[in-house]
Image: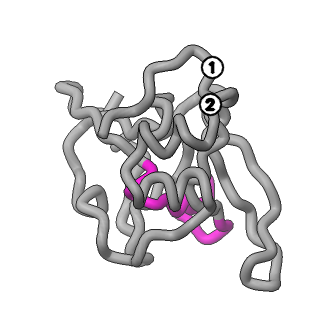
Amino acid sequence: MSAPKTTSPKTMSEEDWRNALTGDQFRVLRRHGTEPAWQSPLNDEKRPGVFHCAGCGAPLFKTADKYDSGSGWPSFSRPIEGQALGTDTDFKLIYPRTEIHCAQCNGHLGHVFDDGPEPTGKRYCINGVALAFEAQGNAEGE
């Protein structure tokens, strides 16, 4: 399914989100679920382009910042420039983790860790089902 077309995704009702998203997208984006590791076809996506929020279409990450972390989920060293992401503290595994969400629609994307590559040292570990990929012709993933 395509991302909902709305000017204010933060005001969408739960029913609107259920109708706009697949079951897996709803479980991850709206219910803070996690897809199984190694399941996303986006793990292998290497074409230049932009990864958008599957919920609202907001641009989140560039292929140029994607790397294979060995975690089983698409991983990025940094988000796209601007205010694409928001954060919260998640205690689901008892210890605190930094949960990241789309700043536009508040959809749960995954977590950020401090074990990534230089120059940021960050690993944005993202549920592939929370992303929609748009290929672009630029070799830099811009």
**Split into 4 quadrants, where in the image is the C terminus?**
top left
Disc number for residue 12: 2
* Residue 52 pos. (x, y %): 42, 36
Note whether 84 is above or below 18 in the view shown.
Answer: above
Point 77% across, 67% down: residue: 90
Residue extent of the magenta highlight: 113-130
Q: Residue reaching furthest front? A: 15
Say which amino acid is labelled 1: Ser
Point 59% across, 52% down: residue: 30
Q: In what element is the residue under mark 1? A: loop
- Asked whether residue 60 is in view, the answer is yes
> In the image, 12: left or right of 6?
right
* Residue 117 pos. (x, y %): 52, 62
- Asked whether residue 119 is in view, the answer is no
> In the image, 46: left or right of 23?
left
Kindly report the distance in space between the C-alpha atoms of the residues bearing marks 1 and 2. 7 Å
Note whether 65 is above or below 6 in the view shown.
Answer: below
Asked whether 122 falls inside the magenta stretch, the response is yes
Q: Residues within 10 Å of mark 1 (few under 14, many from 20)?
A: few
* Residue 63 pos. (x, y %): 34, 43
> In the image, 139: left or right of 80?
left
* Residue 70 pos. (x, y %): 39, 77
Say which amino acid is labelled 2: Met
Q: Are marks 1 and 2 in contact (CB under 8 Å)?
A: yes
Point 28% across, 33% down: residue: 134
Note whether 82 is above or below 13 in the view shown.
Answer: above
Q: Residue reaching furthest bottom? A: 94
Q: In what element is the residue under mark 2? A: loop
Residue denoted by label 1 = 8
Which quarter of the picture shows residue 72?
Answer: bottom left
Asked whether 100 falls inside the magenta stretch, the response is no
